[in-house]
Amino acid sequence: MNQNRLGAAALGLFFAGAAMAEPTYSLLTFDDLTGWATDDHATALTVFTDTCGDMKDPEWQGLCAFAKTAPNARAFFETFFQPMLIEDGEPMLFTGYFEPELRGSKTRGGPYQYPIYSLPPDYVAGQPYLSRQEIEETTALSGKGLEIAWLADPVDLFFLQVQGSGRIRLPDGGGMRVGYGGKNGRDYSSVGQELIRRGTYEPHQVSAQVIRNWVSNNPEQGRELLWVNKSYVFFREVSEVPADKGPLGAMNRSITTDRSIAVDPAFTTLGTPVWIEKAGAAPISRLMVAQDTGSAIKGAQRADIFYGTGKTAGRAAGRIKDGGRMIRLLPIQLAYAMLPETIK
């Protein structure tokens, strides 16, 4: 999925980021974490060890090596980590994302007319490339052998790009997986926010499903609406990832349903254990691991929860737009080193 991923399955589609204040840092205790004592710390430790070996700081490397000896999970976190609340003046916002399963084909034909493109040969990372409209309205990329697969629904293609990875069900009963390969260097623009600006919907009415339905029910206008978002994602085939594993996150490792989150790496080192307390209709208090990123995930109190694969996961992810708070678990020395001199 990675940086890579355009953003959240819900809120990231239609809300722009705001200016953030200078971050503040507050040390907490494990007693301050609501529900800490009843979590499944062993599962969280397993997810942590999936990616901690890729963390470069010596503090993390030492803890990772010990974590892999299968210590008592709760004692491990409580002994070697310090809970830290980092805030930037913006309220906490949780959204959800998932790995879609889509109908597609490796060849063009019948309903399969919408290509998933790999990186073009003239693509240069970080430089503006063709916009979404230029790619979809012209033949600029066609006939170059860049088509990984073909989808039956252009709206599916758009939402595949939002999620950043997916599974493709092929007509012969087989399947393939695609993951993030790069993007066109254009800024992400919110199509949901555009619907609000036009007066089509009120802010509280907009969700991923509402956007999908409107575009599907208004094909011509819908196509033009999607062009408002000039950002475009290219993919690569990642079918070597086992079917029982989650899609690849920003650390190029499989992420885990209900235990992996996407964060802003400017505030949270990838691989960090993060305690989340999500409010809303389905509250969550759980230790997760920051293993992914997304262009719409910006700020110290901003996270996208991975809900899994398929339609059920998609429906669950699309409903999430909740407050709460998240607390990083940092190696003790690193936590104290982050504090301003005035409060050390």
Image: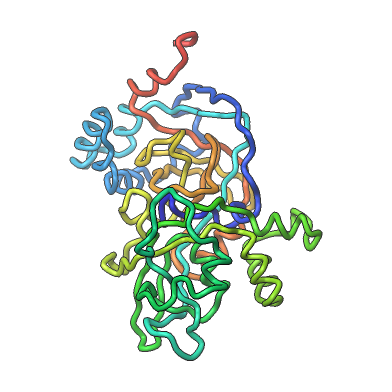
- Percent across and percent down for residue 39 are 42, 43
Q: Return the residue nearer the eye: 103 or 48.
A: 103
The quarter of the image holding the C terminus is top left
- Percent across and percent down for residue 266 are 45, 35
Residue sitting at x 50%, y 41%? 276
The quarter of the image holding the N terminus is bottom left
Position of residue 259 relative to residue 31, above or below, is below
Q: Residue furthest bottom?
A: 110
- Percent across and percent down for residue 68 are 21, 42
Position of residue 26 relative to residue 15, above or below, is above
Residue sitting at x 37%, y 81%? 106
Position of residue 149 relative to residue 210, above or below, is below
Q: How many numbered circles are shown?
A: 0
Q: For residue 198, what is the image quadrant?
A: bottom right
Whether residue 260 is visible, yes or no, is no
Residue sitting at x 64%, y 71%? 223
